[in-house]
Amino acid sequence: MSDERNSPLVDEAMKKASVAWVAVGGGPSLALWCVPLEGVLFVVSGPGEQSAPGLAETDEAQVTLRGDHGGRIVTWPARVTRVVPGTGEWDTLAPLVGAKRLNARGATADLVARWAADGCVLARLAPAGQPAHGTELPAASLAEPPRPSPAVRVTRRPFRLHRVRRR
């Protein structure tokens, strides 16, 4: 299913990908666990799995792959299709993706059956055109401010049982 127009950079980055940063509809990029198979990335989301808002309903997304040290390698447009449970395609692909699922409890067949029963989405992210970024280095920083989170709290001074003398 690999598209012959795929960039060699995209193909090579996908081969080693285990996490992809996926942005849907101009929203923020979310880090999603993924499995590279047949020249595309597969992502599972839904109840009991990772949250990927909007991915099940969209036809396109932006995928960013990063290197071992966190730096961006390439960003490319992706065509998103859904693999439907109960089809021959599901029966072939879902066990392959399930076998690579880290920290899965139970057998792969049980995991795939749970995905189908719970309404989880198995999405295929196929390259749809040339990379948007990655062929040249950016002139400016790509750093973004942290997104608001309920997990953020005020940092307090550490507790000390006794006084620390300075010399």
Image: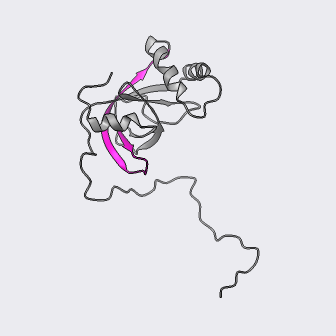
Instruction: Name the image quarter holding residue 78.
Output: top left
| Left or right side of 129 for 48 | right
x then y, percent, for residue 80: 36, 28
**Among all residues in the image, which is located at the extreme right?**
161
Residue drawn where x is 59% and y is 18% of the image: 109
Is 88 contained in the magenta span?
no
Indicate the quadrant where residue 159 lies: bottom right
Please state the horizontal and vertical placement of residue 90, each as a whole percent of the image: 47, 17
The residue lying toward the viewer, choosing from 147 and 110, is: 110
Q: In the rendered view, does 143 fall on the left or right side of 148?
A: left
Does any portion of residue 115 appear in the rendered image?
yes
Q: Is residue 157 left or right of residue 123?
A: right
The quarter in which the N terminus is drawn is top left
Majority secondary structure of magenta residues: strand
Which quadrant, please, contains the C terminus?
bottom right
77 over 81 or under it: above or below: below
Q: Residue furthest bottom?
A: 167
Q: Nearer the viewer, residue 10 or 112?
A: 10
Q: Is residue 65 magenta?
A: yes
Q: Is residue 70 above or below residue 77?
A: below
Residue span colored magenta:
63-85
Q: Horizontal and vertical percent for residue 29?
A: 41, 44
- Relative to the observer, which residue lies in front, 103 or 16? 16
Q: Indicate how the structure is coloured in the image.
A: one colour
- Labels in figure, total: 0
- For the point 46% across and 34% down, the residue is 34
Q: Residue at x 45, y 56 (%)?
A: 146
Q: Is residue 161 above or below residue 10?
A: below
How far from the left and from the top, in percent, is residue 134? 28, 46
